[in-house]
Image: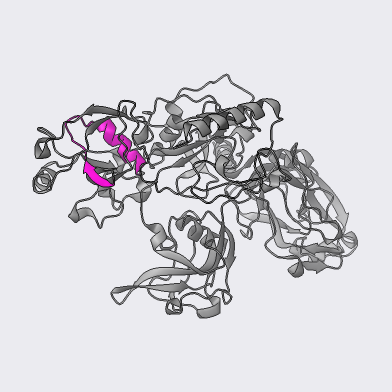
Amino acid sequence: YFRIVHSNKQTIQNHRILNSHSHDFCLFLYFLKYHLCVSVPGRIWLDNVHCSGSEKSLAHCSSNGFGVSDCKHSEDVGVVCSQKRIPGFKFIRSQANSDQVEDVRIRATYSQRKRIPITEGFLEVKDGGKWRQICSVDWTEMNSRVICGMYGFPGEKRFNTRPYKLLAKRRKKNFWGFSVNCTGNEANLSECKVGQEIELKGNDTCGQGMPVVVSCVPGRAFAPSVSMGFRKAYRVEQPLVRLRGGAMIGEGRVEVLKNGEWGTVCDDNWDMRAATVVCRELGFGSAKEALTGARMGQGIGPVQMNEVDCSGFEKSLTECRFNREALGCSHEEDAAVRCNVPAMGFNKRLRLAGGRNPYEGRVEVLTERNGSLVWGTVCSDSWGTMEAMVVCRQLGLGFASHAFQETYYWQGDSSADAIVMSGVRCSGTELTLDQCLHHGKHILCPKGGGRFSAGVSCTQTAPDLVLSSQVVEQTTYLEDRPMYALQCAHEEHCLASSANQADPTSYRRLLRFSSQIHNNGQSDFRPRAAHHSWVWHECHRHYHSMEVFTHYDLLSLNGTKVAEGHKASFCLEDTHCDEGIQKRYECANFGAQGITVGCWDTYRHDIDCQWVDITDVKPGDYIFQVVINPNYEVAESDYTNNIMKCRARYDGHRIWMYNCHIGENATMSLCLQTSEQKS
């Protein structure tokens, strides 16, 4: 093992180097020890690295030399590793022997091989290039629990052994020479111990036992039917834990519901046991990774748990021990997880064609027509960001970057030109495109296919905008302004409809406030429209890069809209940034627009259209609502935190704004207040 100091948090992380020669490894350790002691944090160690692919370590590849670089940290590289293991990978560790197990699988019987997901079958390990069975004599439910977790299932269940015994008698036996010892809280079989050695004597190897069979319970989202018994695997009531900000199924920032408010978990002592408890609770398998340092973006609200300590058998993360006194955790330390999920074959039903890289192209769907499976395209009518999000997730390509309604520049397979899906409408939470609303077999596509087929481009990271509710509360006030001073705003439709007939000498009453919008995501927020398509507004003398950036609404307590406003994004820029982050976007001189990760854009209360015209509103109690990116024009990792709601009391002369909350916390808080008021 070698230890690396993480420059942001100064925490020690352990890493394993497999198959390294001891001499080279010692030299590498010596180098690390020397340089980590004498250098400042944040050094760039390698530049111009060239590998043939056969090297045992990155240190063996040619480069400028350790520590010789002219790079900046904006050029830092990363990798995404394949799940496929190399031959000879030691899957189950044992100090007592040198046997290597390369892979593990659940082999379904003939009657169950067409079922998706495969939840039951003989357990086999690959040893020396051959698949072998494990003897059931010393096999336990805890072993099965670990296997099920690896394959994306929250728990194991009992099964009928009789058909498997009959099938085992007819099969040629080829047993692995060892038993396995798991405690049940391991996230992977590689963490289990190898048990006693089994004497190999042909068909009598296993004594009175038989080959191990594993039967797993799928989570609710993956169960083929209710009869699969998923209710026994995890809680079915209102979940107390959720994942947010992840691109793939079964990954995200961990959030906990406490006292009616969602909050995050601090990553101090965050480990695989705690992460696995979260994954199983949500209907996934064991954890693949326990992530720290807000790797899935920063959350909002309180930090609900710190220094979490789980045994691994808890039904919910809320049952684990944690330090109730520990304070000082910031959202830069939000914990996240990546969970094992079942192999559903989602990515085989969809493909992208004609793109310049695997992350973009025309969307082509595999569907049944006249008794056979054919590939076809998707009608682009109503095609937008939410639909593109589902496609990218289904293919395992991350978030949507853009949704295209014209794809003439991407030449797909000519045999797949026909439209096979139309009227697609997604909420964004679906696992596959065919789970979205669509026309079914009755295709309706007025524009036709061809150049108007739907397309997408995907990306591994996305921005996440969050409004500061505190700034809204602190800056709200009323202003009475004459109509003759509002001509530019009137042209931009920033006043109520009654202003169309208003006398130029009359006054409009404006509810004014400042908004501070922070980018908590993992990539910059950029308007979709390029410079050449921005709209020039002559009266205000500025460009609009987005038609509508925010909606401002005043609602009655029952949700009826009584006044509305909107903010066209004439200038998206980095007003301020967190410490250590450089501003990148500035609107001056027709500059690039956007919000950098870790920066925020402030729309001051004295800017035109930064208001709601409440001239016609009667005194009373209301709900003030702000929605960022309301048309989902730009893809984000989490849309649930784009809405803010406040309570507002207007007496005809003054207005009070209070109890502002973001996202689902806003809805729950307002529901509680409304019910208390009625009672």
Total residue callouts: 0
Q: Which residues are magenta?
A: 129-151
Task: Choose between 366 and 563: the one closer to the eye.
Answer: 366
Image: 371 above or below 675: below
Q: Is residue 590 magenta?
A: no
Q: In which quadrant will I find the C terminus?
A: top right
Residue 259 on image: x %, y %: 53, 30
Residue 229's place in the image compared with 630, above or below, is above
* Residue at the front extreme of this rendering: 23
Q: Is residue 522 above or below residue 25?
A: below
Front-lying residue, 628 or 29? 29
Does any portion of residue 106 appear in the rendered image?
yes
Q: Is residue 459 left or right of residue 97?
A: right
- Which residue is found at the position 27% from the left and 36% from the top? 144
Residue 365 in percent (x, y) is at 42, 68
Q: Residue at x 68, y 51 (%)?
A: 524
Q: Is residue 386 left or right of residue 583?
A: left
Determine if residue 421 is in view. Answer: no
Q: Quadrant of residue 546?
A: bottom right
Q: Farthest residue toward the top?
A: 325
Residue drawn at point x = 70 percent, y = 47 percent? 74
Residue 656's spot in the image, x, y percent?
74, 40
Q: How is the image coloured?
A: one colour
Front position in the image: 16 or 108: 16
Which residue is rendered at x = 63% and y = 28% of the image? 10
Left or right, 80 with respect to 108, comes to: right
Q: Percent position (x, y) of residue 243?
A: 50, 42
